[in-house]
Amino acid sequence: MAVSPFTFAQDSAPGTSLSAWLSVGFSLLLVIAVILLLAFIMRRFSGVQSSGGQIKTVASMMVGTRERIAVIQVGDEQHLVGVTSHNINHLAKLETPISAIRKEESLKQTFAGFLQQQKKLQGETNDKNT
């Protein structure tokens, strides 16, 4: 009785098909889990921690997809900076420092009030120059 290799391949394919699919599915889930774990770690530890503690981020707010406004504290002074993916711009030095607020709603209100105040000041400066 002569048996060709093709008959074994055809007979064994339906039996191993389920185990092959399970193996591929498990591998896919494992890769997705590793990606999600790495994303969580990167998001959690994205900031660079300084040992001296002289420069701190007091507050930050996203204003675009890759743009944000941040209040940083250097020593006893606080500065408002605009951060994009390519550069950082100094926007203003805060005369009255804001405290570190943990609630996001309060943070948004603080930034909104500060930005409205700055807009009014710029409008007054433009009126004086004309």
Image (cartoon, grey):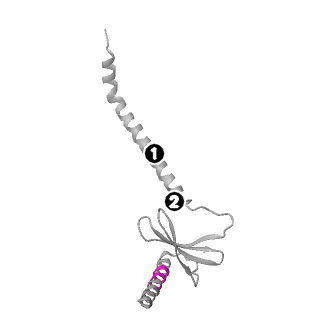
Range of the magenta residues?
110-117
Residue 43 versus residue 57: which sits nearer the camera? 57
Q: Position of residue 2 (x, y in %)?
A: 31, 9
Residue 43 versus residue 127 in the image, above or below? above
Q: The C terminus is located in which quarter? A: bottom left
Q: Is residue 86 magenta?
A: no
- Residue for badge 2: 43
- Residue for badge 1: 31
Which of pointers 2 and 1 indicates the residue nearer the eye?
Answer: 2
Q: Is residue 32 left or right of 12 when viewed as pictured? A: right
Q: SS of the residue at dot 1?
A: helix
Q: The N terminus is located in which quarter? A: top left
The first of marks 2 and 1 along the sequence is 1
Residue 102 versus residue 57: which sits nearer the camera? 57
Residue 109 versus residue 115: which sits nearer the camera? 115
Q: SS of the residue at dot 2?
A: helix
Q: Position of residue 17 (x, y in %)?
A: 34, 32
Instruction: Name the residue rendered at 43%, 46% in the picture.
Output: 29
